[in-house]
Image (spheres, rainbow, N blue to C red):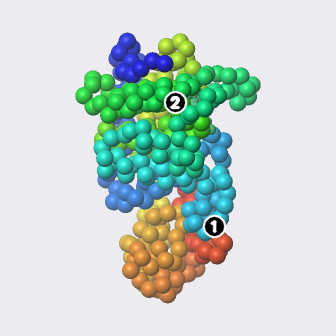
Amino acid sequence: MKLLPFNDYDLKTPRILDALNEASRSLAELKGFANSIPNQHILINAITINEAKDSSAIENIVTTHDSIYKVLTESGFKEEAAKEVVDYRSAIWFGYEFIKDKGFINTNLLVKLQSMIEHNKAGIRKTPGTNLVNSKTGEIIYTPPQSEKEIRDLLKNLEDYINEFDDQTDPLIKMALIHYQFETIHPFYDGNGRTGRILNVLYLVLNSLLDSPILYLSNYINKNKDIYYKLFTEFREKNNYEDWIIYILKGVEETSKYTIELIKRIQSEMESYKEEFMTKLPKIYSDELLDSLFYEVYTRINYIEQRCGVTRQTAAVYLNQLVDAGLLEYEKVGRESIYKNTKLIDLLSKF
Ligand SMILES: Nc1ncnc2c1ncn2[C@@H]1O[C@H](COP(=O)(O)OP(=O)(O)OP(=O)(O)O)[C@@H](O)[C@H]1O
Ligand SMILES: [Mg+2]
């Protein structure tokens, strides 16, 4: 396998530079827009839940927002697919906090992310036999490196490339090459696609192209998975790095625009929700309470108790009044009493 940096490639072709220009501009707009919003955690929580769902869908792990929130409540509700989605989102948060704290990305972090997604400690592949196969025909498309030593050396090379900030290549182009390289090393038995897609967003944050983990290509990839797979192969077999890079850059552009739209929708939903809340229940309205109802797609009594600093009884009264006003929906999940923000769930599941 080729080692990074790929110095023999011309990374400044006119087509690449054009796509880079558009991608950088859209991403900068997203960054600025997201920073202008007060409740960052609401955004991140909502966006990452959709990403976790979309990225897992690439792997055919398909679930609904309804199941996801049930798993989130930790009420003992079990649905494997929804659990994997929730774990994927926890992995994003873990990675984000890691790089905020440490300022680098290393092999151990990638191993940790993969173990969070897959819930096992298998780590880097030790036993040969992993191949990428065409899911329809069963035919082997690609055999990644097989020895643990070789995989570790390649990951070390990738790690050095990721944490090198002085080179002349734009981080968005580097992200495209990093994603290609990571998937081509294919260091794990499973979960490589999802770990690699988390690595993408972490890399953007590491390079300050974003301040929070809110740009995800999975929805874009899902729209036409075949192209994603095909371009990997063309890159490796025919040196067609140009189309690969442009594909990723277009993804950044499209997804930045899409995410700006999503943020606007969440904002306007919060505004109309707020209005309805203030009109119908002026006595209990507070900004903290509104904020708590959008923190996750559901809430429960003890969250309101903690976040709003009220007694359990008061919290229960608030939530029941919100249900009566049609602003929340009550559901019993296992032994838990859950209050769903159906308006937010609807918005996210339709976007
Ligand atoms: N021809 C290829 N060359 C290199 N990497 C590829 C190729 N085709 C697919 N991939 C990568 O391999 C990933 C699948 O690997 P794996 O099953 O380990 O990951 P996953 O996270 O479980 O799956 P998925 O990405 O489908 O969600 C794809 O998502 C893609 O990123
Ligand atoms: Mg898999």
CA neighbours of label 2 inside 10 A, class few (<14), some (14 to 19), many (20+): some
Mark closest to the chain's N terminus, 1 or 2: 1
Callout 2: SS? helix
Q: Amino acid at mark 1?
A: Gly
Q: Residue at x 46, y 49 (%)?
A: 92
Location of residue 320 with respect to 111 vertically, above or below = below
Q: Residue at x 53, y 41 (%)?
A: 123
Q: Which mark is residue 247?
A: none
Q: Is residue 156 left or right of residue 128?
A: left
Q: Residue at x 31, y 50 (%)?
A: 101
**Number of residue marks:** 2
Q: Position of residue 334 (x, y in %)?
A: 66, 72
Q: Position of residue 12 (x, y in %)?
A: 34, 17
Location of residue 121 with respect to 303 vertically, above or below = above
Query: Ligand 2 quadrant?
Result: top right
Asked whether residue 14 appears in the rendered view, the answer is no
Q: Residue at x 30, y 41 (%)?
A: 208
Asked whether residue 286 appears in the rendered view, the answer is yes
Of 268 and 65, nearer the camera is 65
Q: Position of residue 1 (x, y in %)?
A: 48, 18
